[in-house]
Image: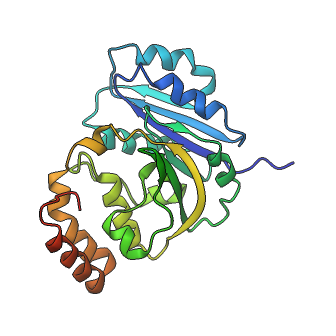
Amino acid sequence: MNTPPAISIIIVTYNVAGTLQTCLDSIYKQQYPSLKIIIIDGNSTDGTVDIIKANINKIHYWQSEPDTGVYDAMNKAVKHLTGDWVYFIGADDELLPGFSDMALELKDPTAIYYANVFAEGSKRLGELTRYQIAKCGPYHQAMIYPRPLFDKHQYNTRYKVSADFALTLELCGDSNYHFVYKDYIICNFNHTGLSGTVIDKPFQKEKAGLVFKNFGLKTWFRYRFHKLKRRDNPRA
């Protein structure tokens, strides 16, 4: 039988000794056979590197050195991709069996596939309209990207918390790709991490401009009207 297309699974780490092994074990449990783990560590001092070394036979590539943040590490990671698809998972998240089911449906090299995560006790977020993608976007851990996308695009490291969302907005403006929803729950997402607790002020300041650039006037106007109604909520 032909080997299915490889998926690079990227984990960026910094002092995550308490959760990394559980995350790795959730990947090892997957039925999909062609998963290549890439770990970019930010020079951890808490035993994270020892865990990586203990799993070395199951890791495609790893390195440990200082970086300027999670998205700097992700940009480093995409230089070591293998196969046809790319997935990012947090070291405090866990893959669910639905990931393997979804992986079998990755057929279109121009599609950015997205599904659901389990977060805060429920399935999130379902299929999104183009406007909903502009407003809130799929979870980063719900998305599987075609590898060639990263030959052109990367994470904007000026955004310390929301560069993944900024990339989603940018990709909506790239006519070479389109978004495809699959109704699976692929990840148990830990909402207590950085993205769930810190507001990315530079991104929030520039988000409307990104919406205008990548979605056009109609969506931008609708988004601005929504913001005016939600002035008391900087995350809206």
Residue furthest out toward the bottom:
218
Viewer-proximal residue among 51 and 125: 125
Left or right: 146 as drawn, with respect to 213: right
Q: What residue is rendered at 64% in x and 48% in y?
A: 98
Q: Residue 187 placed where, x, y %?
A: 53, 44
Residue shown at 22%/74% (left/top)? 226
Judge whether 145 appears above or below 118 on screen: below
Q: Nearer the viewer, residue 116 or 179?
A: 116
- Say whether residue 82 is visible: no
Question: Would you place residue 88 above or below residue 14 in this image?
Answer: below
**Depth order, front residue of 181/191:** 191
Residue 205 visible within the image = yes
Quarter of the image where the C terminus is located: bottom left
Q: Is residue 216 left or right of residue 28?
A: left
Looking at the image, the residue that sits furthest to the front is 121
**Residue found at the very far right of the displayed protein:** 1
- Residue 169 drawn at (x, y percent): 34, 66
Q: Quadrant of residue 227?
A: bottom left
Residue 205, x across and y down, in percent: 14, 61
76 w.r.t. 227: above or below: above
The quadrant in which residue 107 appears is: bottom right
Residue visible at 38% across and 62% down in the picture: 137
Task: Find residue 121 and report its horizontal and vertical position in percent.
Answer: 45, 44
Number of residue marks: 0
Q: How is the image coloured?
A: rainbow
Residue at coordinates 60% horizontally, 55% vertically from top-left? 184
